Image (cartoon, rainbow, N blue to C red):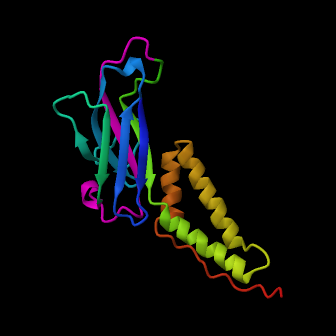
Amino acid sequence: MVIFKELRITSDGNNLFIDASIAPYDYFQNMYIKSVSIDTEETFLSNDKPSGKAVMVYNNPENESIKNINLNLGKDDVKVDSLSGHIFYIYVQIAGVPSVDTPCSMDKEYTIGVALNWFPIYQSSLKILGNIRDNCCSIPKSAINFILRLKSFELLLRTSQYLKANKIYRKWFSDLKISSNIKPCNCN
């Protein structure tokens, strides 16, 4: 029911951009954006609706026919110390009356989107790859381990397995305790 045109955190970790719209189908003509709430990996409970600890960043109390929302949020808006080091679950709540010909499961009250700052993970991967290029003849197990962890995390997010993704993120990526010290393999 909601299409996220943009949902990202800037590489410097200062801004969270949310650009969401009601899908442009005739059966959503009488629908509007009611609210936008955000959970983190620490407060997330389900894909269905925000937790009681979610932060509401937009509210439409007058029930105006708002079809598009464009937000630029900082850490204070989301009530966190930093936009880096967290997964953000953005819930867009829809209200109004969908048409009777609305397809099944397209009339859900909430649509969820996910945002996190991928830049620290990217920087760590560049360090690891740089050390492999400069110092090794074969790929070390620590680099293979990092790649497999990253791919499993991405797959969990893409398949909406958010509770498992939260565990993986906290365990492997939240503090980025990734070793980039690869010893030379002396293959020359």
Residue beneath the point at 16% across and 30% down: 62
* 41 shown above or below 133: above
Q: Nearer the viewer, residue 116 or 156?
A: 116
Q: Residue farthest to the top?
A: 100
Give whichever of 75, 71 is nearer the camera. 71
Does the stretch in magenta take in 94? Answer: yes
Reply yes or no: does residue 186 show up in magenta: no
The total number of labels drawn is 0
**Relative to the observer, which residue lies in front, 29 or 43?**
29
Q: Residue at x 43, y 41 (%)?
A: 5
**Residue 31 position in % (x across, y down):** 31, 24
Residue 121 position within the rendered picture, expressed as x and y whole percent measured from the top left? 53, 65
Snapshot quadrant of residue 79: bottom left
Q: How far from the left and from the top, in percent, is residue 33?
A: 29, 32
Q: As displayed, is residue 46 above or below residue 67?
A: below
**Quadrant position of residue 110:** top left
* Res. 47 in view: no
Q: Is residue 78 left or right of residue 148?
A: left
Region rendered in magenta: 75-102
Which residue is depicted at the point 25% across and 60% down? Answer: 76
Res. 51 image quadrant: top left
Q: Which residue is the extreme one toward the right?
A: 188
Q: Is residue 35 above or below residue 41?
A: above
> Please, which residue is most extreme toward the left here?
62
